[in-house]
Image: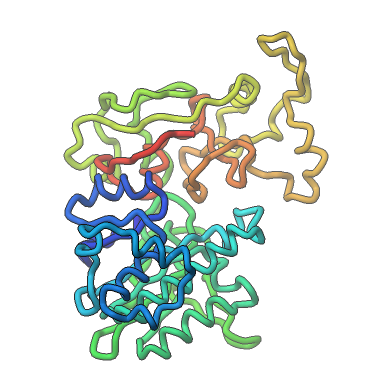
Amino acid sequence: GLSEGLQRSGVSDTKWAIEYEEPAGDAFKLNHPEAKVFIQNCNVILRAVMQKCGDAEDCISTSEASELAAAMDENELNSLPLPGQVDFINGGPPCQGFSGMNRFNQSTWSKVQCEMILAFLSFADYYRPKFFLLENVRNFVSFNQKQTFRLTVASLLEMGYQVRFGILEAGAFGVPQSRKRAFIWAASPEEILPEWPEPMHVFGVPELKITLSETCHYAAVRSTASGAPFRSLTVRDTIGDLPAVGNGASKTCIEYQVDPISWFQRKIRGNSITLSDHITKEMNELNLIRCQRIPKRPGADWRDLPDEKVKLCNGQLVDLIPWCLPNTAKRHNQWKGLFGRLDWDGNFPTSITDPQPMGKVGMCFHPDQDRIVTVRECARSQGFPDSYQFAGNIL
């Protein structure tokens, strides 16, 4: 998404990309056919580059990374960019280790993902591009008592870069969802360090401040809660033109049925003739019944379910309300939003990889239809055009 946005805004053209997950790499190839995509651990790629340039002795890596770098085929090695060829490095190293939505952020895998920040900085140190942009979740600035954030800024300053940082709310910049993200800009001394864009849409969040000390707090941009040139984009603005589909819809290509009803829809459709990936996860029988019983009104969630049992097709009688929710609600803000419907006149919550009614972002039911939001609806909530192609399976 970051590369897509930068390219569409005219900021940069992507020539090389690294993805660890194969479906993500395949999707990148589909949408950026002019770019060379390496589906590999970034540490292996950096090791291979340094080895190619005769700097292997300066590279600290695991034996596994060294072996994988040595095993890369000649075509891939010849495609690796050299220092001096890369003007701009941008990316969002895996954020699960920092994210408040990850209930297991102390796990070994999450700690490995946190270490990807160091690998990302190593690319900046070796390539020394003119510009560098890091994007991550809001908690990145406070994680580990701010040590990771401070290390990142200090490392870039030590390299000689100008640095600017801040937390931005995507909804204030014309994205139809609440998505707070930390950004770190860096520019070499001879370049002009870009300013943050001006937020142009009303969005009801306060100033997003970073605490620098007990008495010093910094906000990169103003809050638009009290006013801005444009209103915020709503769920209706975003997906109100999409055809109705049912639970578990799996037809990957269908026709549009109505004309766009908002400027956002006209822009997001572009020149697309057919609609792809308007598909959704299939809920089990019980969750589908729960979804059907959630009222079709703003703010409706599990708390609106009747306290009764339902009979499944196998004859089993089960509680309509999941037992764990009312029994733990006081400790978890009433589990607000679980099994929740989107509000036509509201915005999307933060989009995640795997929308689930019992997940961290449980408000995932369509405002009117008894199903989980589709891949295309989630993509639109992120600002992806309808022409954007995805790869992999829906789980």
Residue drawn at 24 percent across, 78 percent down: 83
Quadrant of residue 124 in the image?
Answer: bottom left
Tell me if I can see residue 225 in this picture.
Answer: no
Quadrant of residue 288 in the image?
Answer: top right
Q: In this view, does 226 lie to the left or right of 356?
A: left
Q: Position of residue 333 (x, y in %)?
A: 73, 50
The N terminus, quarter of image: bottom left
The foreground one among 12 and 169 is: 12
Q: Which residue lies furthest to the right in this view?
A: 327
Q: Position of residue 166 (x, y in %)?
A: 46, 74
Q: Is residue 117 left or right of residue 312?
A: left
Residue 137, relative to residue 176: is it above or below?
Answer: below
Q: Position of residue 299 (x, y in %)?
A: 60, 39
The foreground one among 269 and 115 is: 115
Q: Is residue 327 left or right of residue 159?
A: right
Residue 136, relative to residue 291: is it above or below?
Answer: below
Tell me if I can see residue 316 in this picture.
Answer: yes
Residue drawn at 26 percent across, 84 percent down: 192
The foreground one among 70 and 284 is: 70
Q: Where is residue 270 in the image (x, y as percent from the top left)?
A: 20, 42
Residue 163, relative to residue 262: is it above or below?
Answer: below
